[in-house]
Amino acid sequence: MPSCCDKPGNNRARYYALAAIVIAVVLLVALLAGCGTTRLTSANYDQIRDGMSRGEVAAIIGEPSQMVGGQFMGVDGGGAMWREGDTAVLVQFMDDKVVGKQMTRGTATRLLGVGGDLLQ
């Protein structure tokens, strides 16, 4: 008695199904591998320099968790905060350029509103 897989065209369907499973597994592994990495490291923090744009900072440490902005006497300014676990990075911007930065770890992150709403 012939099986369902002996029909013409079923080999192609099996091939595509297997390929889809392999691709799904590879994507899942890549996603999970990315979950274990942090961008808020001392090395990345040290790369942030005065005069960098928001985009340049985001390229180093990713998109911020929180942002505030405003204008004073025609000058745009604000700040952005990145948080991961017990690490927080606060970067101040003026006219879309870095003018200051701060990194805290441990319980000191509570002073910056980590877990709270300082910048909201």
Image (spheres, rainbow, N blue to C red):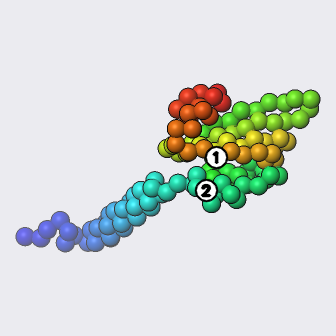
Q: Residues within 10 Å of mark 1 (few under 14, many from 20)?
A: many
Residue at numbered disc 2: 42
The span from disc 2 to disc 1 (Cα, nearest Å) is 8 Å
Q: Position of residue 114 (x, y in %)?
A: 56, 35
**Three-letter code for the amino acid on which mark 1 is drawn:** Met
Helix, strand or loop at mark 1: strand
Task: Give the amino acid at mark 2.
Answer: Ser
Question: Which residue does the image show at 60% across and 39% down from the upper left?
Answer: 65
Q: Quadrant of residue 91?
A: top right
Q: Is residue 38 visible in the rendered structure shown here?
A: yes
Quadrant location, the C terminus: top right
User: Which numbered tag is attached to residue 103?
Assistant: 1
Question: Quadrant of residue 10 in the image?
Answer: bottom left
* Figure quadrant of the N terminus: bottom left
Q: Are marks 2 and 1 in contact (CB under 8 Å)?
A: yes
Residue shown at 60% from the left, 32% from the top:
111
Q: Is residue 64 left or right of residue 52?
A: left
Lateral position of residue 41 relative to residue 5, left or right? right
